[in-house]
Image: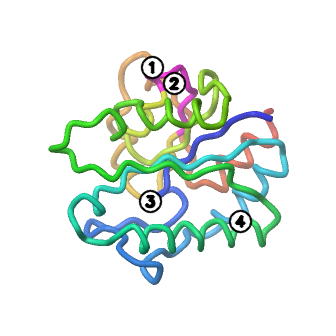
Amino acid sequence: MRLLILDRDGVINEDSPDYIKSVDEFVFLPGSVQAMADLSRAGYTLVVATNQSGLGRGLFDLDDLEAMHEKLNAAVNEAGGEIAGIFYCPHTPDDDCDCRKPKPGLLDAIADELGMPVKGAWIIGDSLRDLEAGIARGCKPILVRTGKGAASEKKLAGPALAQTPVFDDLAAATAFLVSNP
């Protein structure tokens, strides 16, 4: 099985500057659930790595977050796929933790819990911090234009980011990954 790491907000579901605070606000981007199921059936071990500072800011609680993730898991399972794990950072930027992307602590937690190396895995995000966390651990970055991706695309620079494949959305990235294993 090949590991594939996905950011959540802006890649799988709609993002909001006011945070996604409830299961009702957790709205899938078109094609994202089917894309995840297709990746799973193609032999990828899917994990989600997401910054969720709304927890640390008190905008929602752990029950709300778990309800969102239950909705995500159920939708992917119903479409015929599986998510191996959802890893999140609950801290605010001021906490200066090791798990908030662009720091790679969430990727270290993924490697530890799944017993799989993250080096060489694809990481798909809509922001530079997603990609930078992956690059710090030897992942291969993909940027999607959904969420913050269109704005992030203008900032791709430097040797590690300049060659990053860019796709309109998760479905397009999935088509690439499935046809180029």
Dot 4: few (<14), some (14–19), or many (≥20) neighbours within 10 Å?
A: many
Dot 1: few (<14), some (14–19), or many (≥20) neighbours within 10 Å?
A: some
Tell me where the magenta segment starts and ends, as one range: 135-142
Judged from this view, the residue extending furthest toward the left is 94
Q: Nearer the viewer, mark 2 or mark 4?
A: 4
Q: Residue at x 51, y 74 (%)?
A: 67
Q: CA distance from mark 4 to mark 1?
A: 31 Å
Residue 115, percent from left and from top: 67, 30
Q: CA distance from mark 3 to mark 1?
A: 23 Å
Q: Earlier in the sequence, mark 3 or mark 2?
A: 3
Q: Residue at x 54, y 66 (%)?
A: 69
Q: Nearer the viewer, mark 3 or mark 2?
A: 3
Residue 154 placement: quadrant: top left
Dot 3: few (<14), some (14–19), or many (≥20) neighbours within 10 Å?
A: many
Q: Are marks 1 and 2 in contact (CB under 8 Å)?
A: yes
User: What type is the residue that disc 4 sits on?
Assistant: Val
93 relative to 108 in the view: left or right: left
Residue designated by label 2: 163
Secondary structure under the numbered disc 4 in the rendered image:
helix
The colour scheme used here is: rainbow
User: What type is the residue that disc 2 sits on?
Assistant: Gln
- In which quadrant is the N terminus drawn? top right
Q: Are marks 2 and 4 in contact (CB under 8 Å)?
A: no
User: What type is the residue that disc 3 sits on?
Assistant: Asp
93 relative to 8 in the view: left or right: left
Q: Which mark is residue 76?
A: 4
Q: Residue at x 15, y 44 (%)?
A: 94
168 versus 178 height, above or below: below
Q: Are marks 3 and 4 in contact (CB under 8 Å)?
A: no
Q: Nearer the viewer, mark 3 or mark 4?
A: 4
- In which quadrant is the C terminus drawn? top right
Q: CA distance from mark 3 to mark 2?
A: 23 Å
